[in-house]
Each structure stands twice: as structure tokens, then as C-alpha cells.
Amino acid sequence: MLPDCAAATAAAQLFLAPHRQVVRHPSGRPWLVGAWPADRLAVIDRDGVRTALFGQLPERPAVEPPDRLPGSFHVATASGERLRVRGTASGLRRVYYARVRGVVVASDQARVLAAAIGAAPDPATVAAQLFAPNLPHPLSLDSLWLGVSALPPDHLLVVDGAGPARTERWWSPPAPAGSLAEGAALLRDRLRAAVGVRVRAGQRISADLSGGVDSTTLCLLAAEQGAELVTVRVAPVDPASDDPVWAQRAADRLPGEHLVVDPTAAWAAVDWSELATPAEEPVGGLLTQTVLGHLAGLVSDRGSRLHLAGYGGDEVTGVSRVYLRDLLWRRPVTVLRHLSGHRALRRWSIATAVRALSDRRSYRRWLADTAAQLRDPPLPDGAPQFGWGGAARLPAWATTAAVELVRDRLMRAALAGEPVADSRAQHRAVAAVWTTAQAARQLGQIMPGVELAVPYLDDQVVAAALAVDLAERGTPYRYKPLLAAAARPVVGDLPERTTKAKFTADGLAGVRQHRAQLLELCDELRLARLGLVNAAALRAALVGLDPTGRVLMAAEQTVSAELWLRAATETEERRVAAA
């Protein structure tokens, strides 16, 4: 995406290629350069302003303003020399920008800009990839490339000709004040519209059917639209998982073909020591990555070109238990009643709960404390964490240099950082949505031949869920209260599920199966060359005892970062050699 100025013509030459498409400004200069299916781009001319929407769009996108449309898409507007670009508030569609040959160019892919300017990976951002399971906000929003900036999802980019770029906030989360009944009805309507954007009658599509209420609801909504369904579930390694029971109940209600994928077969087909990720950023789970690649081949062979997934269902409709602290002085009776339920479920002592509720740190203070605690022991599973985010720790194999790089980045954020929302619970809800969107975006890039669709991460769906009262979303006395209420008219007489399977056993089995390959990776770590990882310590973690799976989860995240770094540096090495 380029502004309408003379300098942009020269910059555009770096991106033009025989297979690339071009949409031009009225002047004839390139405006949009890339590759997209015909139904994924709409250009609207109105009152001297050209607006481009690209992504998963409704059939008639010109009828309403972009902010009111269902679907998931970027928005770019051009008026004179001014270019304005934004992604989605959910973070599923990001915007990156860099100065290329004297002009700021925006793109939905950071690596395209990195290749254009010959950028190297940013060691500090790469070091932050060692966090597991998630990066703390705002580090999760940073670009992995030096010289390439990442636009926060709630901001838009403004470029005036060859001038500098500036950003403006375009989105804020709604106040969480709505009732559960009204919010559930709106959420259901918006989910139905979101599925309708992607699915047409008679269209063959595939969809996850794990047995959870989020994926089951999407499958039933797709069936409502008259889609020819191919559903897929991954058979759990853990024999105690009840996912198969719930998935079969849903499959009995659905037409079409229902596939069961053996993850061990998918893992066996991949040599992890030679795997290089094609995604923009490290893909969080190697196991998930290999299974999705296998799954994409299965559904593609059956004619599917679009795959529905329930990513984000939990994060969009749920809320952190920190809402108890947010509501303590405004609604003490509700908080005390809910606290009793949460204590019973998680075995919190009164002293532990009171200590958590007394956390009065500002967002900046919390960031500074996080920076200081990177080497502290992890908190026990289930411990109440009522700060602006969960406790973030770097693994034992992160070097002192990696810790210092991450600490410096956190301390700089602490000097000027502002929360996304006024309340901790709403801030953490948005941060969780952005983290999930980041993972879904990367997973979508490793499914060859099949486009990933994640309706729960549509902006309209996210806004409907976030507008519901915090206590209604977080009550301990009902399982997934908002999603369950929204799904009830869709799932009909299917029993209401109140359990959620865990995948620790699956992760442990996958790592055991590929332990030799993972250890082989430790012999030539690019992360070690950058001074970020102690290879011997990582190797020890891979062969050590880990009954909870936490260490191996962190190791898997590190290996993902290593594979991404290999792909990134090898691409740059080939480019330099060719030059």
C-alpha cells in the first residue's frame, strides 16, 4: 500500500512481479500491489476518496461503513497524497510499515518489507519469543525485523506523500455494561453473519469439530447456510479426554463427512530438525503446526478451499478473574459471592485471595515489576494473578543477554505505556484476543491450499462479547456463560458441555516422539549464535523430567523461534548471495 507521490513509483518497483496485481491511484501511480483472489478485494469510490477493503468480505461491502460490516478485512483509503491504513481491532489482520526508497510503504506482511530494505531480525524481539505460553503485552505487538514497524491493532497509519508516518487510535473496547441476555443475542446474530460472509449454499468447506461449544456452534451455523461440510477432529492422545464423546454427539447432528486425524501420524511425517516455518512469526506449537499441515492436505483433497476454526472462542467470550478486583468496591456483594465460587474451584486460601485483591499497581508499575521478575520462579498453577497481565518468566535456557534485552524493552514500555482499557479485566481480555489472533494468523499461513476463517475474531463479534458485563462473563457458577447462552438456540437439544480437555499428554507424547530431532537442533542453534539461548540448558530441558508439561511447552516455543530464525536468516543469506 503506497501513497500517491513520485517517490512511491520508485518504491513500487521492488514489489512488482509478473504474478502481482496492481490497483492504481487516479494519477496512474501504484496504490495497492500484491496477490489476492477476485472476491477478496473491493474498491469503493465516494466523494473523492477511494477505499479498498481486502480480506473476507460481505457480498455488497459498499452498503455500510466498514466499521459496521461483518467479516475480517484491512481498510485502506486514499485521498490526494494521503494514505490511511488499518487492520482489524482483533489483531487478526495486522499492518506493518517501513521507509522504502524515501517513502513509507505499508503491508500486511512484515517479511515483504524486511526483504525490500534488507532488514535483519531484531534480537530483542526474537529474545521475547522465548516466553511461554504467551508474550506479555505490549511486547507481543512488536515487529521481529529491524527497520520495520508494527502498527498496534487499535491504531491506524497515516502517510502524507513522501512525509513521515504517524499513527492515530481508531478503536477502543466498549464499556462492559450490557446484560448477558442482550449480549448473547447480539453475539449470536453477529456470529451467524460472520459465518454467512464466508459460506454459501452448496459450497464445500471444512471445519474443526473438536467437541467444544465454540467449534460446534460454527459447524451448525455453516450447516444452516447449506454448506457441504467436511468436519475434522484430532484424536487426543490422552485417553481421559472427553472431546471424542462431545464431538460425536455434534457430528450425529451434522450432514457431511467427518474425519478423525491421528496426530502421531502427522508428527511422524515431519522431520522437525529440518522444518522451517513459512509464517510471519514463530508458530507457537510445533505439534499444532504439523497437524494443521497434515489436516490441510486431507481437506484440500476433499475439495475444501476454506476451513472454519473456533480459535478465539474462549478469549473473546471469557474474562480473567481479575474482574473480582475491578468490581470489589463498586459491587462488593457480587464479588464476595463470586470469590467464594472461584476459591472453591481453584482451592485458593483466604490469605492468597486477599493478597491478590489488594494489588493496586498502575499499568506502568506492573510492567516495571515484570521486567524485574523475569528470572523469578514461576507461580503455582491456578494461583490468582490480579495484575495487568499474568506473571511472565523467561526459561532457564535464556541467556543473561536475552534477559537484559527483554528487560530493557519492558522498562521502555513502562516509561510511556498505557493500558488498552481502563479496567484490568477488559485490558487483559483485549490483550488475550490479540495474542490468540496472532497465533491464528500464523497458523493460517501454514495451511497450503486452504484459507483459514476464524469468525470469533471478527471485529463485530469481538465488540459484541466485550460489551457484556464483566461479572456476567466471569461467573464461576456457569461454564462459559456468554458463549453457552449465545449458542443455546443454535445447538438446540445437544447437552450443555461443562468440561474442557487438556492437552498436556498430547504435547508430552509429541516431544517424546521427536526428542532425537529436537536434540539435533540444539547442535546448531541460530539462537545460540545470537547469544540468546544456552544450548546445553535447552538440551537438558528436553531430556529432563517434566510431569506438568510446563518446561516442554516452553522448550517447544523456543524451538519454534529457532525454526523461524533459520527460515528468516537463510532467506536473507540467499538474497545477499544472489546480489
Image (cartoon, rainbow, N blue to C red):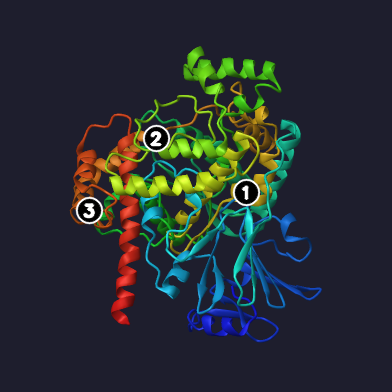
**Residue 433 point in image, percent of width and height:** 56, 45
Which type of secondary structure does the marked residue at label 2 adopt? loop
Query: In this picture, is 97 found above or below 285?
Result: below
Is residue 253 visible in the rendered structure shown here? Answer: no
Are dots 1 and 2 in contact, CB under 8 Å? Answer: no
Question: Which-is-in-front pick, marks 3 and 1?
Answer: 3
Q: Nearer the viewer, residue 14 or 290?
A: 14
Question: Which-is-in-front pick, marks 2 and 3?
Answer: 2
Question: Which-is-in-front pick, marks 1 and 2?
Answer: 2
Which type of secondary structure does the marked residue at label 3 adopt? helix
Query: In this picture, is 135 found above or below 528?
Result: above
**Residue 66 point in image, percent of width and height:** 72, 60
Q: Circle 3 sits on which residue?
A: 521
- Identify the image quadrant of residue 358: top right
Q: Earlier in the sequence, mark 3 or mark 1?
A: 1
Q: Residue at position x 31%, y 57% from top?
A: 563
Are dots 3 and 1 in contact, CB under 8 Å? Answer: no
Measured in 3D between alpha carbons, the distance from the residue under mark 1 to the one under mark 2, in whole angstroms, is 49 Å
Q: Circle 2 sits on which residue?
A: 373
Q: Residue at position x 33%, y 48% from top?
A: 402
Left or right, 380 with reference to 14: left
Q: Earlier in the sequence, mark 1 or mark 2?
A: 1
Q: Residue at position x 68%, y 18% from top?
A: 332
Measured in 3D between alpha carbons, the distance from the residue under mark 3 to the one under mark 1, in whole angstroms, is 44 Å
Q: Which mark is residue 223?
A: 1
- Identify the image quadrant of residue 479: top right
In the rendered view of the protein, which quadrant contains the C terminus?
Answer: bottom left
